[in-house]
Image: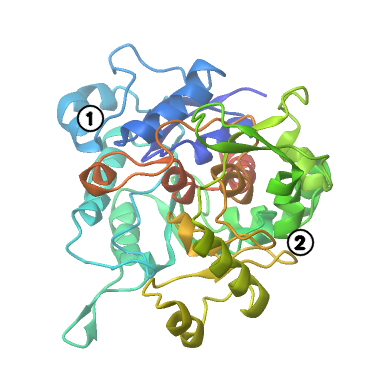
Amino acid sequence: MKNITYIDLFSGCGGLALGLHRAGWKGLFAIEKSKDAFLTLKHNQIDKNKNFQWPSWLEMKNHDINDIIGNYSEKLKTLRGQVKLIAGGPPCQGFSMAGRRKEDDKRNQLIDSYIKFVKLVEPELLFFENVKGFTIGFKKNNTRGKAYSVYVTNELEKLGYDVYGKIVDFSEFGVPQKRQRFILVGSKKSNAKVFFDKILSNRTEFFKSKKITDKTSLSDAISDLLRSNGTTASPDTPKFEAGLYAKAESNYQKLMRSSKPLTNKVADSHRFAKHKPQTIQRFSYILSTARPNKSIDDKLREKYNLKKHTIVPLCQDSCTPTLTTLPDDYIHYCEPRILTVREYARIQSFPDDYEFKGPYTTGGERRKVDVPRYTQIGNAIPPLFAEQAGIVLREMV
């Protein structure tokens, strides 16, 4: 297949880019503000696999999209006719129903930066992803305003795109997570709605090629990563313990491990948290009494004097709820602990040879500019869905 060129905006750690590459797309460059997230993308998709061509005029590092627009607008105009697709959507935190949801969040203004970038490059296709809250207007004096999804659609239509968007549940595409996201597709040549029809009709053949289904449970995804399988010193943080692989028990596990040498028994980023004894005891009690996949009730909160908004014991027999960027929102389905970074990655459908960079967790002011491993994964588009999207987008070129 001939590689077709795209630019990845707000690329994060590279979940969308990985899926597009596997579908036959070739990246020109990626724009990501976070140093940690870009480091992960660069390590996996540039240093290891050469998935991006990267122009000589752009330094290969993390960038703010507004700096690129301000400094390289003429260079971007020269890409007209060469770049078939702009993929990726602005950060979602300002729109998320799970967060504080602030209309004056500065990150919401990146919508205009996105539109400016599209106007400069004029690609044939657009693929845009954001949270469900992007389709819901902010309230002002008990009146709900116009949703940002409507604003983006109107602005892109002015630029000559046929635009269609809808909420998509990634669990219907083989991802073991009930993750609903707003997907918008724009096309200068064809009916954008065709994308959503084709990605559904392609599922059976895609699942057959990967030997998976849309019924992957949490245990199907991560049961080979249990702590009880054995531990060793963590390769990147020796004062912690990391988990060892057990035999792959499901086709999903085999798929995630298919490109990783079986001689390496230690999974990347599979470092266990150091829980206090009282935390382990609390987790054990919650696992034995609370409803799985539901946040704990007030009675349990009172028993342990818990103020945290979300604490969800996970269910082994179904997919997970939407993963957030906070690992202590969830308790492992059969072990009294939070999930590891690698387990997060499995649930998001990152293959095991995808290595994450930067700190595991962080806080304070640094969190505003650099994002640790859990946050990178929680913000990502699942590569398994991205690959299916990439296949359909190729058909639309």
| Badge 1 amino acid | Ile
Visible residue check, residue 179: no
Residue 42 in picture, x, y percent from top left: 44, 24
Residue ID at (61%, 48%)? 385
Numbered disc 2: secondary structure = loop
Q: Which quadrant of the view contains residue 9? A: top left
Residue 78 in picture, x, y percent from top left: 30, 22
Q: Look at the numbered discs 2 and 1 and tell me whether their residues touch, using CB distance below 8 Å.
A: no
Residue 317 falls left or right of residue 94? right
Q: Which residue is mark 1?
A: 68
Residue ID at (42%, 35%)? 8
Residue 128 falls left or right of residue 226? left
Q: Which quadrant of the view contains residue 2? A: top right
Q: Earlier in the sequence, mark 2 or mark 1?
A: 1
| Badge 2 amino acid | Lys
Residue ID at (52%, 78%)? 296
- Cα distance between the residues tagged 2 and 1: 42 Å
Residue 230 in picture, x, y percent from top left: 73, 40
Numbered disc 1: secondary structure = helix
Closer to the eye: label 2 or 1? 2
Q: In what quadrant of the picture does the C terminus appear?
A: top right
Residue ID at (59%, 46%)? 389
Vertical placement of 391 versus 3: above or below?
below
Vertical placement of 333 versus 361: above or below?
below
Q: Which quadrant of the view contains residue 32? A: top left
Residue 242 in picture, x, y percent from top left: 61, 37
Residue placed farthest to the top in the image?
Answer: 56
Q: In what quadrant of the picture does the N terminus appear?
A: top right
Q: Which residue is mark 2?
A: 215
